[in-house]
C-alpha cells in the first residue's frame, strides 16, 4: 500500500523552466538568460504595475471572489455577457477545472482528448484527477492531424483540448482545419480551444479565433491568459469564455478566491494598455526572425511558430545540449515530458537575450 492512490503515485509532474536565480546560485554566475517559460521579455505594462502597487495597500481584505469588475471589463472587451466568463489562476487552472468539473474518474470513466506533443499540463491535470488521457497522432511538422483527432473520439470523450497555437510546437490550425474539427466533434464532447498565445497569432490571415465558431458549436469554451503578451505571468490571471451553464458548474468547483486582488487590478490596467501588447507583439516578431535566421545559420531546423517561442530540432539527444547551454548561463526548455527528445523550446527574448542564446548554441552544437 502506498500513501497515495495509484494514479498519484505514477503522476509525472510538470517541470517548469529553471529559475534564473537557481542557475546563478548553482553555477556561481551572474547575468543568466532565461528563455524557458514563454514570458514577455519587456515585462508588464507600467500601468499594470502601478495598479498592482496601489492595490497592495488593501491586501488585508479578501479579493472579490466573483471578479465582478474584471469580468465586466473583459465582457465589454470581448462583446459577451459577464456570466459566460470564468476567471482562473492562469488559464492553467481553467484547464484543470474543466477536467475536475466535467470528467468522471476511473478506468471506466470519461476520457480527456488532445493530440500528441500538446501542452503538457492537460495530461498532468487529467492524471491527477484519475481521468483517462488520450492523445491522437500528429501529422507532418508535429501539427495536429484533424482526421486522427476525430477518429480518437469515443463515447467516453468528455473534454477535448485544442491548443491553438500549440505549445511546445508553435503550430496552429488554420480556419478550414478548425472548422473541420469543430464540425466533426460529436455534441457530447466539450471542446476547449486554448488560445494562450492568441495575441501573437491574431494577425496571421488564416488563424481562426474560436469565438467565430460560437454559433456553430454552442458548448464551446475558449481560454485566454494575461501571462503572455500582457506580461503578467507572475500574477496568475487567465479566463475562459463559455456557456452560462458550463460557467456555473466551473464556478461551483473553483475555489472562492482563486485570483488575488492585486492580480485582478493589474489585469484591469493591462487591458487598458493595448499599446504595451502591440509593442510586445512587435518585439516578438523581430526576435522570431532573429532566432530563426540564427538557428538556420547553425544548420538547425526551426519549426514554424505562431507564438512567442520556437521549437528547434537539435538533431541529436537534446539533454546534453540543454545541460551545456545551462553551463553557459542560457536556460531553454527540454521537452522530454512532451515526448520530444531531440528538440528544445526557446522562448523569444529581447534582441540581446536572443543573441546570447544564439552565441551559446553556436558554441555547443
Ligand atoms: N496553455 C498553453 C498552451 C500554455 O502554453 C500555457 C503556459 N505555458 C498555459 C495554457 C497556461 O498559462 P497560464 O496558466 O500562465 O495562463
Image: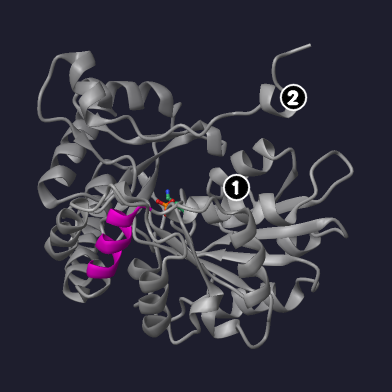
Residue at (64, 28) in percent of width and height? 11
The label nearer to you, 1 versus 2, is 2
Evaluate if marks 1 and 2 touch, with contact meaning CB atoms under 8 Å apart.
Answer: no
Where residue 65 is drawn, which disc sits there? none
Q: Is residue 55 visible?
A: yes
- Residue 54: give x, y in percent of width and height: 15, 58
Residue at (46, 76) in percent of width and height? 207
Residue 268 is a magenta residue: yes
Q: Is residue 114 visible?
A: no
Residue at (25, 56) in percent of width and height? 231
Asked if 235 appears above or below 199 in the picture, the reply is above
Q: Earlier in the sequence, mark 1 or mark 2?
A: 2
Drawn side of residue 319 relative to residue 57, left or right:
right
- Residue 359: give x, y in percent of width and height: 16, 35
Q: Main secondary structure of the magenta part?
A: helix
* Magenta segment: 260-269
Query: Which residue has dot 1 on it?
Result: 122
Where residue 5 is drawn, which disc sits there? 2
SS at mark 1 in the image: helix
Drawn side of residue 121 relative to residue 359, left or right:
right
Q: Quadrant of residue 321?
A: top left
- Residue 319: give x, y in percent of width and height: 42, 24
Q: Nearer the viewer, residue 77 or 139?
A: 77
User: On the rendered image, what quadrant is the N terminus found in?
Assistant: top right
Q: Nearer the viewer, residue 82 or 167?
A: 82
Q: Nearer the viewer, residue 40 or 261?
A: 261
Amino acid at each position: 500500500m502506498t500513501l497515495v492512490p495509484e494514479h498519484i503515485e505514477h503522476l509525472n509532474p510538470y517541470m517548469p523552466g529553471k529559475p534564473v536565480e537557481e542557475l546563478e546560485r548553482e553555477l556561481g554566475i551572474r547575468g543568466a538568460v532565461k528563455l524557458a517559460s514563454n514570458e514577455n521579455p519587456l515585462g508588464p505594462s507600467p500601468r499594470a504595475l502601478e495598479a498592482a502597487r496601489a492595490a497592495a495597500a488593501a491586501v488585508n481584505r479578501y479579493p472579490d471572489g466573483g471578479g465582478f469588475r474584471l469580468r465586466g471589463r473583459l465582457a465589454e472587451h470581448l462583446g459577451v455577457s459577464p456570466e459566460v466568463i470564468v476567471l482562473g489562476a492562469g488559464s492553467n487552472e481553467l484547464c484543470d477545472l474543466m477536467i475536475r468539473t466535467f470528467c468522471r474518474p476511473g478506468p471506466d470513466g470519461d476520457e480527456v482528448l488532445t493530440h500528441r506533443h500538446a501542452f503538457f499540463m492537460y495530461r498532468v491535470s487529467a492524471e491527477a484527477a484519475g481521468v483517462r488521457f488520450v492523445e491522437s497522432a500528429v501529422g507532418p511538422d508535429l501539427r495536429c492531424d484533424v482526421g486522427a483527432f476525430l477518429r480518437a473520439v469515443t463515447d467516453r470523450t468528455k473534454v477535448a483540448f485544442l491548443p491553438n497555437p500549440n505549445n511546445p510546437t508553435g503550430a496552429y490550425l488554420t480556419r478550414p482545419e478548425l472548422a473541420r474539427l469543430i464540425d466533426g466533434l460529436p455534441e457530447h464532447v466539450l471542446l476547449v480551444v486554448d488560445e494562450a498565445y492568441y495575441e501573437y497569432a491574431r494577425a496571421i490571415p488564416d488563424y481562426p479565433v474560436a469565438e467565430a465558431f460560437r454559433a456553430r458549436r454552442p458548448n464551446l469554451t475558449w481560454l485566454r491568459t494575461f501571462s503572455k503578451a500582457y506580461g503578467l505571468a507572475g500574477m496568475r490571471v487567465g479566463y475562459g469564455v463559455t456557456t452560462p451553464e458550463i460557467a456555473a458548474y466551473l464556478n461551483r468547483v473553483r475555489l472562492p478566491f482563486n485570483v488575488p486582488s492585486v492580480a485582478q487590478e493589474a489585469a484591469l490596467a493591462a487591458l487598458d494598455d493595448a499599446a504595451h501588447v502591440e509593442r510586445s507583439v512587435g518585439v516578438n516578431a523581430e526576435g522570431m526572425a532573429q532566432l530563426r535566421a540564427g538557428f538556420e545559420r547553425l544548420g538547425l531546423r526551426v519549426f514554424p511558430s505562431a507564438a512567442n517561442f520556437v521549437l528547434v530540432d537539435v538533431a541529436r539527444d537534446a539533454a546534453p545540449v540543454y545541460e551545456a547551454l545551462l553551463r553557459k548561463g542560457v536556460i531553454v526548455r527540454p521537452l522530454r515530458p512532451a515526448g520530444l527528445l531531440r528538440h528544445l523550446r526557446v522562448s523569444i527574448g529581447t534582441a540581446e537575450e536572443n543573441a546570447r542564446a544564439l552565441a551559446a548554441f553556436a558554441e555547443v552544437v
